[in-house]
Image (spheres, coloured by chain):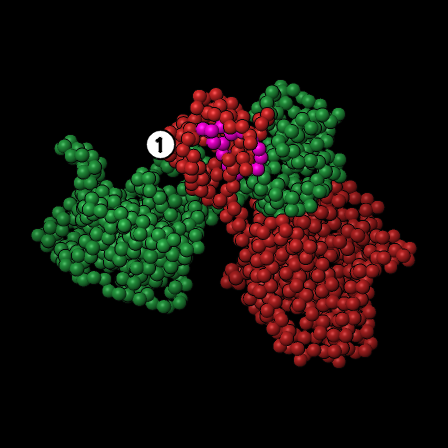
Chain colours: A red, B green
Amino acid sequence: MLKRYLPVLTWLPHYNRRLLGADLLAGVIVTVMVIPQSLAYALLAGLPAVVGLYASLLPAVLYALLGTSRTLAIGPVAIIALMTGTALSSVATPGSAAYLEAALVLSLLSGAMLVAMGLLRLGFFANFLSHPVIAGFLSSSAVLIAISQSAHLAGIDAGGYNALDLIASLVGNLSQLHWPTLAMGLGTLLFLVLSRRHGVRLFTRLGLTTGTASLIARGAPVLAVIATTLLSWRLGLAGRGVAVVGDIPAGLPPLTLPTPELSLWKALLIPALLISVVGFVESISMAQMLAARRRQRISPNQELVGLGGANLAAAFTAGMPVTGGLSRTVINDEAGAQTPLAGLFAALGIGGVTLAFTPLLHHLPIATLAATITVAILTLVDIPLIRQTWRYSRSDFSAMAVTILLTLVEGVEAGIISGVVLSIGLFLYRTSRPHSAVVGRIPGTEHFRSITRHEVETLTSVAFLRIDESLYFANARYLEDTVLQMVAREPGLEHVVLICSAVNLIDASALESLDAINARLQEAEVTLHLAEVKGPVMDRLKRSDFLDDLTGRVFLSSYAAWQALKASPEAGTEEAP
Amino acid sequence: MLKRYLPVLTWLPHYNRRLLGADLLAGVIVTVMVIPQSLAYALLAGLPAVVGLYASLLPAVLYALLGTSRTLAIGPVAIIALMTGTALSSVATPGSAAYLEAALVLSLLSGAMLVAMGLLRLGFFANFLSHPVIAGFLSSSAVLIAISQSAHLAGIDAGGYNALDLIASLVGNLSQLHWPTLAMGLGTLLFLVLSRRHGVRLFTRLGLTTGTASLIARGAPVLAVIATTLLSWRLGLAGRGVAVVGDIPAGLPPLTLPTPELSLWKALLIPALLISVVGFVESISMAQMLAARRRQRISPNQELVGLGGANLAAAFTAGMPVTGGLSRTVINDEAGAQTPLAGLFAALGIGGVTLAFTPLLHHLPIATLAATITVAILTLVDIPLIRQTWRYSRSDFSAMAVTILLTLVEGVEAGIISGVVLSIGLFLYRTSRPHSAVVGRIPGTEHFRSITRHEVETLTSVAFLRIDESLYFANARYLEDTVLQMVAREPGLEHVVLICSAVNLIDASALESLDAINARLQEAEVTLHLAEVKGPVMDRLKRSDFLDDLTGRVFLSSYAAWQALKASPEAGTEEAP
């Protein structure tokens, strides 16, 4: 029981020196690798760079204690940073104290929601984000981030959280373009792209194993950070107009208390919910993928608690909303992390840097960070998936397209909300006009298929109608129309058999419709039968009066109905054509 | 084509003297019968009594031209009046000029929405109001109306649009209790209840036909109106503190233009939508019931246009939102109306009264109107249906219970919205955790049923899993878990057959899950097969790469899979126990 709520207890007792070695190495590597991205994502959210470091400390410790994934690495991530910036700028001015305070409230709300969802076992909520909506959201968010970073690459101030605003302010401030910044930004970008594309091949040719090679190739951003910082320091670029990270206060994060201002809490409620759900989906997908590869188990509801704890920790240590990050997790995994202790070591490492080495980051150019973000984020743009969705299902594609369009035009919140609402709406619309098929017997078998798709036998006075949907309020009336129109079309009909093999539910509204159908068929002297009613559905029907009123019978199978009704004198067989 | 949009053209050319006689008689009867309720419902909405008369004129004419029901009677109705009062009192003070103006805006918006929904063929939207939610909403609204009217019965001023407010103000103003008003109110109430219960029996005993007897019994409210008005006039009750209708301006309704104040329009948008949908549902249910009885056809989308036209007419003639009324339609039908001309004649009759006879209504006591509303409305409280829903489905019942509770506690808008949202939410929740059953063959047949419910044969190395739900984003991950857990439980398994007879849709998210299941089973050296995939689902799968990657086959029927896999050397049969 305790193990369920404190997963640390499942692995800590079996801890040994071999695991410690692996985790320590991974911790050191992650410390070095994630500092640049932590700074960059804080800036992306409109917060001081140091907030990104703070958010990589205690939150990671909390997740190590509460989370169920062994190698998930927690901290600020690009999409959540973008969503955070959007939410905060709607309630405060970037750079103001109120903006910082709002970030704490957002973390607190998001953390509380995640913990609550976990304790209430509401992890399934995340399932309502369909894959196409997530993919569309990630792709378009990545484009938004890339646009905003391209401004930093050129030393231009650009604000806004949708593509139109961003491009407008980018173009409007084009006169700010700073050639030295652009040169360094593009240089870094080129280096990163090349080392991402060709780095692994180069290092394996030099005789390294693939694992080590890919780890070193992933170290390219660190190399770029060191090189450009040195360059910036030696050439005094800050004095020549190149934007640098500047002074970062040394020391551990201060203890913070989120302001109890109710109107602010109210304004951030929806953004916090969206950040929680999107963060959870991003994190759990990765955790499940890794766990599957290592044959470990993830508990979605406990993951909610772990992520919630991390965000609560961020709220009280001057942080920002965090989740399991794609790139930092991959680094952690490839560096050989075995248990959450690796995350703890990385947190200790980052804490050490925050305590003593922040002056080293003073000369780091913002353009370098922009280049690292841009290269990392563009992997989220998944054009083949978009094309594949278009081919497979227009309905899925339209949900995806609306998500992409609204994320770009209106921003992340409008995008994700409209995607979810539209995909639920389309599903409901689809189920409200269910497919049904008149079926006949495939000769020589007991199997019944559609008369339009297969060569089947039919009985002249008996119609077999297969209903291809659960019967519930949204389609109850439609069913009435379908059956009554069919009867109106075929005057010789004496029996209607509703094949319920695909009916998984008959709700109270549909029961009333079945009653109505039964009564109306009775007036027309047509007998209504049911076949292949599933166990759970039948159990429920028995609790109503419907079965007493039913003019016909309930057959176990369509074939049983066929045999019984074929025997009646008026039923003539029509052979398959 | 023209006939579709102007249904009057379908019946007017065949009009004859016999129909004219019937319609004229019905028109006269309806005129007399509906005047009291028209006044009462306007008062219920917090509007001057005469607005109820105005709203029974031009709107009825418009519906006669545009509607598809032959006997539906249009005008103010109780539930819509209650919803109107709730909406208006949120934007203006009852009795003020702004309140009257808001009523016109509400009619205009509601009319425009109905027409738009009709032209866009969105009639199916109304299906999302499930029967239990509608029944719960009607029952609790009726209780609200009865409480507000019981104040009038006793001469007490009571305000509010939820049960708590109403009861609080009723109790608070209890000192206003006016004994002569109460005596007359209760007397009228008793008379109406008795004549409703025993009237028909009495008159048939006196030798009348059942039809005539029930019509006369329905005339009881008119009798009560006449008797109490005479009494009030002779005894000068108005001077003794009994509230009466008072002066009603004579003459046809003025031409009105709804104010183009945008903030008011915005505030009334949601109420107008709710009034439109509830009004449409109330109206269409009745129209369909009557049409079925007379073997006529109703076009839901054209009905939307007809009701929309009626509400637009109300907006421009000092009216209020209207719809097809239960009681006035039953009166019209029983009075023998044959075509919409009966409604036109009734409108002419009411117009005549409005022109010349409003002074006759001066002394009509408000308590009489309250008694007529109370008796009419309480028929909507359907306790047996509530009990029946509880027995049949807890999920349907909970949607109903929430609707009832929130309507009483928070008012009509909160009630209906929460009912709809909850019933959709419960449906989605249900489909997100689909039922599935491991099935086996019923010996000697080709039919497969659940191994827990039926005595079936199974194959030791083959699992037949029947999925009882369409596969879409909300349950895609759940399916993965189900299949993989089953495989983990049974190590000897070599084949899994997913029986898709109940799968009516596989969306892009579910396709990814199927891909994942296929890959994971392949790792575990288990072959995945599908059986009974429906035509439309198969068509779509063929557009993806899934069928190429599938390790097993797609069988036409479960039995075909059984025969093929039974032949494989490792499959042993286990007989039914």
Residue, x 79% and y 71% (percent of image)?
Answer: A187
Q: In the rendered view, would you say A327 is above or below B397?
A: below
Residue corresponding to mark 1: A523
Name the kind of residue labelled 1 in the image: Glu
SS label for mark 1? helix
Q: Is residue A34 left or right of residue B367?
A: right
Query: Along the horizontal axis of the image, is B324 left or right of A246?
Result: left
Whether residue B26 can be seen here: no
The residue shown at (56%, 40%) is: B504
Image coords of residue B222 (percent x, y): 17, 46
Q: Quadrant of residue B540?
A: top right
Across and down, in percent, residue B106 comes to 35, 60
Quadrant housing the N terminus of chain A: top right
Q: Is residue B26 left or right of residue A471?
A: left
Residue B258 in the magenta stretch? The answer is no
| Any part of residue B538 in sight | yes
Locate the C terminus of chain A by quadrant.
Answer: top right
Q: Quadrant of residue A28?
A: bottom right
Q: Is residue B400 left or right of residue A16?
A: left
Which residue extends farthest front? Answer: A577
Q: Nearer the viewer, residue A177 or A255?
A: A177
What range of the chain is rendered magenta?
A453-468
Name the subunit of mark 1: A
